[in-house]
């Protein structure tokens, strides 16, 4: 029975070691997933912070664009008023057969916008540029004719100044709008990266939880094996003590019987050896 219990204890010990090793492996795996999750969460925060910075820059540029547009439109409105006065003067005095300066200016703005925004061939672009030059030349000729009148000359100069300021503001509006769009695109891309890293962090956390729970289960099995081992140790120790005691009793009986035999020999006057005498002394027969 004792040998059977010892064999069973060996199996439980091996099982205990397996659970302990598996628990340690799973704990290491859980730690790895936790590190990955934390790194991804930190990266997500970086992406969100950077995206927020780009959003603020975009909003600032858009705000400036809106403000400059209002100023540009106001300058164009003021120029239009002056051009309207000039047109009225032209109608009163006749002789100016070309199209009005105001109308030409609108056409030039339209053509310039096409040049900036449409994808056209080199020949078409050259043709567009020539047409714009012709219109500007026509405006200068009409203005030269109109400026013979001092009042009209002052209005024409003021209108040109207003148009120039509006054009400069428009160029600035274009630059700021492009910058705003750049920051908007960066913001969108960063938020996309943040979403991706957040999803990966969630997956890493899920893997962490699964590994940790599995490690906890292995630890429970390990603890159960340890308890079972202690129970086996108690039983085996008790059996060993009992076996040892039984063996000692048997040995003592055998020694006593031998000693009694030697004592009879002693009483009969037979010669004893030193070992015989020592045995009689240990048995307290002499």
Image: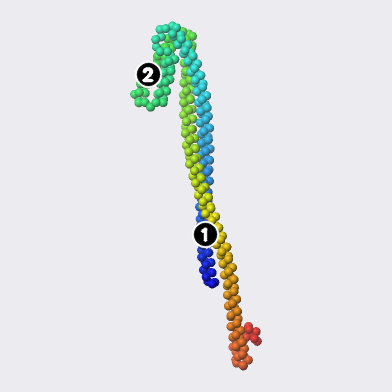
Within-10-Å neighbours for mark 2: few <14, some 14–19, many 20+: some
Within-10-Å neighbours for mark 1: few <14, some 14–19, many 20+: many
57, above or below 135, in the image: below
Q: Which mark is residue 124?
A: none
Foreground disc of the pair 2, 1: 1
Q: Position of residue 29 (x, y in %)?
A: 50, 52
Image-based side of 72 in relation to 246, left or right: left
Q: Position of residue 240 (x, y in %)?
A: 57, 72
Occupied quadrant, residue 101: top left
- Which part of the image, by quadrant, shows the C terminus? bottom right
Which residue is denoted by mark 1 in the rendering?
Answer: 19
Q: Is residue 85 visible?
A: yes
Q: Position of residue 81 (x, y in %)?
A: 49, 14
For label 1, the SS is: helix
Image-based side of 231 in relation to 155, left or right: right
Q: Which mark is residue 131?
A: 2
Occupied quadrant, residue 135: top left
Tell me the distance, in whole angstroms, between the alpha carbons under discs 2 and 1: 87 Å
Could you tell me which residue is drawn at 43 percent across and 12 percent down?
A: 143
Number of numbered discs visible in the structure rendering: 2
For label 2, the SS is: helix
């Amino acid at each position: 029975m004792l040998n059977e219990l010892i064999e069973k204890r060996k199996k439980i010990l091996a099982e205990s070691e397996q659970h302990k090793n598996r628990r340690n492996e799973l704990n290491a795996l859980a730690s790895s997933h936790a590190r990955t999750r934390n790194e991804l969460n930190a990266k997500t925060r970086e992406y969100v912070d950077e995206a927020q910075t780009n959003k603020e820059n975009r909003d600032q540029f858009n705000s400036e664009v809106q403000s400059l547009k209002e100023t540009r439109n106001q300058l164009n409105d003021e120029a239009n008023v002056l051009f309207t006065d000039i047109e009225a003067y032209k109608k009163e005095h006749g002789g100016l057969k070309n199209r009005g300066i105001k109308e030409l200016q609108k056409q030039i703005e339209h053509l310039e916008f096409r040049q900036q925004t449409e994808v056209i061939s080199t020949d078409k672009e050259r043709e567009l540029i020539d047409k714009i030059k012709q219109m500007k030349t026509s405006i200068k000729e009409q203005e030269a004719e109109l400026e013979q009148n001092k009042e009209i000359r002052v209005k024409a100069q003021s209108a040109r100044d207003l148009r120039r300021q509006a054009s400069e503001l428009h160029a600035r509006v274009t630059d700021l709008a492009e910058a705003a769009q750049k920051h908007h695109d960066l913001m969108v891309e960063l938020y996309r990266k943040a979403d991706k890293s957040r999803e990966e962090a969630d997956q890493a956390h899920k893997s962490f939880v699964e590994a940790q729970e599995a490690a906890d289960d292995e630890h429970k099995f390990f603890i159960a094996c340890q308890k079972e081992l202690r129970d086996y140790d108690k039983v085996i120790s008790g059996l060993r003590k009992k076996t040892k005691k039984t063996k000692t009793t048997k040995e003592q009986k055998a020694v006593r019987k031998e000693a009694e035999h030697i004592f009879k020999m002693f009483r009969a006057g037979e010669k004893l050896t030193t070992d015989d005498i020592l045995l009689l002394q240990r048995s307290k027969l002499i």
